């Protein structure tokens, strides 16, 4: 049985206040313990908190607002002293509550999957660490965001334009020859009509993986360097590195897009690269003593974020041994 409406409102309000305080970056250890205690008091508290996290991941509206960013922890001092830490309310909590009231998020059965969302007015979408979400644009195109990624919808008029700000996304483009579809990533632009492709942004390096159809990748001419362009067909992957070196290779598109199903597939990948990829999805990081990752190659399929199974696989293969496990890291030593 759900809580009465007034109680639900009180829980949502408290969750919003805690959320604003944690996002201020100035939460004290005492306040952190108070938050954890509140979270453990009731499943309703946990549900309210998770809802806010999902909303935050799906829109950057609150994060971009300077009034939220400016929330200060001194407004929440003396949690146990009777002054009331909820004095951080006002605009921050009110805006969070407004978002909670207007956004609907459908939970899915997979841990870390934020479900499907219809894009209407919101223009910025983010995922947190270990999360993944699918967005349906107004034109029917579908965008899947990988962990710790951000995409902006720039325009949905005569040209459908999006920008990948960080991370990785997969685009299933609704066919409409009269409205070109383009994705900007750094200074590169991927143009398509009706196709399916992935784009990954690592610093200044851009990787485009084409599953079906055709796309054109372009980089405008700059004062100190010439422009670039490349046509791609299905099964091709383009890597545009920071030194202006563009390479196009044939790849296994199913393997390269296995992250869409929450899996990471490695086929004789350098162990150092596989470790880095696994760490992208997990709060608990794989760390090697003295930074020495064995010069080995790994083959296997792992659930994204399951660093424990990955560490055990390294041990079974004789690549490394587990030295210590803590909440935030798995320390390994090369064999």
Image: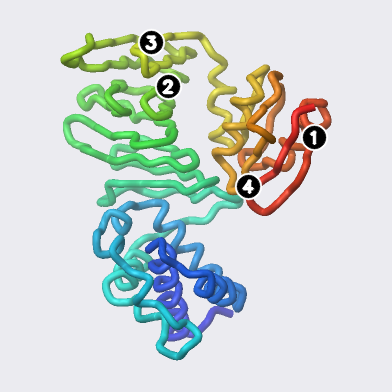
The mark lying in front, picked from 4 and 1, is 1
* Figure check: 304 above or below 221: below
Residue at the (55%, 69%) spot, across then down:
46
The mark lying in front, picked from 2 and 1, is 1
* Figure check: 334 above or below 10: above
**Crowding near pointer 3: few (<14 within 10 Å), some, many (20+)?**
some
**Earlier residue among tags 3 and 4:** 3
Residue 290 screen position, x and y as percent = 66, 33
Q: Is residue 17 left or right of residue 254?
A: left
CA distance for labels 4 and 1: 17 Å
Instruction: Determine which of the numbered discs, if any, sits on residue 34 in the image.
Output: none
**Earlier residue among tags 2 and 4:** 2
Disc 1 designates what residue? 321
CA distance for labels 1 and 3: 38 Å
Residue at the (27%, 24%) spot, across then down:
187
Disc 4 designates what residue? 284
């Amino acid at each position: 049985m759900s809580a009465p409406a007034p109680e639900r409102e009180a829980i949502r309000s408290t969750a919003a206040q805690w959320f604003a305080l944690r996002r201020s970056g100035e939460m004290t250890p005492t306040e952190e313990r108070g938050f954890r205690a509140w979270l453990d008091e009731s499943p309703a508290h946990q549900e309210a908190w998770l809802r806010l996290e999902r909303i935050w991941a799906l829109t950057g509206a609150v994060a971009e607002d300077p009034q939220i960013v400016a929330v200060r922890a001194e407004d929440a001092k003396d949690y146990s002293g009777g002054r009331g830490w909820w004095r951080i309310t006002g605009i921050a909590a009110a805006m969070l509550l407004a978002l909670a009231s207007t956004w609907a998020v459908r939970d899915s059965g997979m841990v870390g999957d934020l479900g499907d969302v219809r894009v209407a007015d919101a223009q910025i979408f983010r995922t947190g660490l270990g999360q993944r979400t699918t967005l349906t644009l107004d034109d029917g195109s579908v965008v899947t965001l990988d962990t710790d990624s951000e995409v902006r919808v720039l325009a949905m008029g005569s040209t459908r334009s999006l920008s990948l700000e960080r991370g990785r996304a997969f685009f299933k483009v609704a066919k409409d020859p009269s409205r070109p579809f383009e994705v900007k990533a750094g200074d590169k632009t991927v143009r398509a009509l009706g196709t399916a492709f992935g784009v990954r942004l690592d610093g200044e390096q851009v990787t485009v993986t084409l599953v079906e159809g055709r796309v054109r990748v372009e980089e405008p001419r700059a004062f100190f360097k010439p422009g670039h362009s490349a046509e791609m067909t299905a099964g091709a992957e383009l890597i545009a590195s920071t030194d202006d070196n563009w390479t196009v290779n044939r790849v296994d598109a199913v393997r390269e897009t296995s992250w869409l199903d929450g899996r990471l597939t490695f086929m004789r990948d350098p162990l150092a690269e596989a470790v880095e990829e696994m760490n992208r999805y997990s709060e608990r990081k794989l760390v090697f003593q003295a930074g020495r990752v064995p010069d080995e190659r790994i083959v296997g399929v792992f659930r994204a974020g399951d660093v424990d199974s990955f560490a055990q696989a390294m041990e079974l293969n004789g690549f490394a041994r587990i030295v210590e496990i803590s909440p935030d890291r798995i320390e390994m030593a090369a064999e």
